[in-house]
Amino acid sequence: MAEPQQPAQAAPVRTGRGRLKVYLGAAPGVGKTFRMLEEGHRRAARGTDVVVAFVECHGRYRTEEMLHPLEVLPRVERDYRGGRFDEFDLDAALARRPGVALVDELAHTNIPGGRHEKRWQDIEELLDAGIEVITTVNIQHLESLNDVIQKITGVPQRETVPDEVVRRAEQIELVDMPPEGLRRRMVHGNVYAPDRVDAALANYFRIGNLTALREIALLWLAGRVDDALRRYRVDHGIDETWETHERVVVALTGGPEGDTLIRRAARIAARESGGDLLAVHVVPGDGLADVASGTLAAQRRLVECLGGSYHQVAGEDVPATLLGFARDHEATQLVLGTSRRSRLRRRFTGPGIGETTTELSGDIDVHLVTHAHSGHQVRQHQGPHEPAAVEAGEPPRSGERLPSTGQAVAESAGPADELRRALATALRAVDELAACYSKLTDDQRAELAAAQTSLKELGGLADRFPAP
């Protein structure tokens, strides 16, 4: 066996915080400690002052072989409940001041008697002293995933580390292995002692458990990569969307078409494994919504049931607010419903939110989805004296009759009745436009007057249709 490496001369005093690298294991036994020691050897071979501050070998002889010829710091012994335990000696590491310290098991709970309760707090002190640290942790020890993983494996995790501690690391490297490969390692005695293998394979290390742990680790790390990419784009002033991940934003007005849009957006997001669904509702700049909260609450539940997230943002310019939200969240596609305004009303009031959003969307794909409440769809009237409303969801005016004849709309489906219903809808739209006459241009006023005249003439023509 090679002789241990002689202690290198302590590095000069460094200023600034040290860097943290984490080897994140998808499950116990995948080889994260081994990978950490491999990096220690590479760094030492390049002349870096590397020490093994604390490594737990768990009786694995190949891991023990990897300790040599690296310098290994002494441990401190502490008594606890009648037993004697070896622990990481923080003061020895600070006094040694290496360039890089290898510290295993980030989530470990220290034996009482030291300065800190948790090992990650010891590592924070090393980093504050300017020492670079390489450490290890398994995915099941992250605080935010503790309850999820317990439900999957049935094993509670008493030692956890805050997610933010790991997220702050300059580098996170996933150590992964297919479930079948990890189980073979166990059978060969490379993970646990022979007397523990059968129980482990039948419980925690079942194929289903290992597959779920692997997926959770990949998804958690993907979220961290997204955060890093977002910071990079902000730091470098990059505004355009990078389509590294499919994200679909669906815009909700609180109208009855919302369920249709949500389901369509969910299908688009599902085309790519791991696609994200985000629903957004824009309220006026004062933050006060102008739609029934019950409708949006139901739509929010539907979004969350389909695995998406619901957001509410304030803004007076709806297209700009929608696109700002989409770009902030790296969205690749935006789903909106077609207008509920009639074609005539759109002719006089200009392009709607969907058209404007499409024109300004840039490299974000915009889907304008038709639905039963679009402006060209006319709702059946509710009673003998109530013509169909110009927009879906808009109640007919009480007692309103067809302006052309003054007679009630019959329940028959003859051509005269169809024409009367269409005329009623068109005249309603013209009346609404007349209410905002002062805002129209001279050309629009002339077109409005011509439309009113034409519709009245058509009303007289409808009266001459024979009854069915």
Image: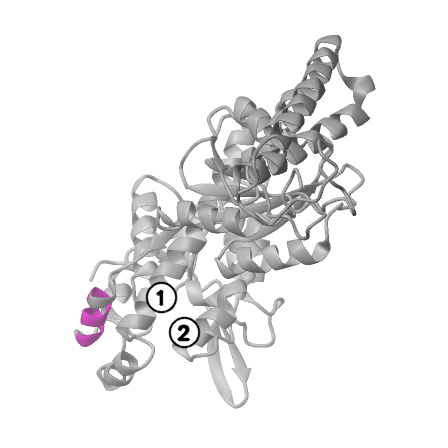
Considering depth in this image, is 293 or 234 the residue closer to the camera?
A: 293
* Residue occupied by mark 2: 152
Q: Position of residue 170 (x, y in %)?
A: 48, 44
Amino acid carrying label 2: it is: Ile
Give the residues in magenta.
181-187
Rendered location of residue 349, percent (x, y): 68, 23
Q: How far from the left and from the top, in percent, is residue 121?
A: 58, 61
Q: Is residue 188 above or below residue 67?
A: below
Task: Judge the density around disc 2: few (<14), some (14-19), many (≥20) Cα neighbours within 10 Å.
Answer: some
The disc label shown at residue 29, or none? none
User: Tags 1 and 2 in contact by the CB under 8 Å rule?
Assistant: yes
Q: Residue furthest bottom?
A: 82
Colour scheme? one colour
Q: Is residue 386 visible?
A: yes
What residue does disc 1 label? 212
Is 49 located above or below residue 193 in the figure? above
Mark 1: which secondary structure? helix
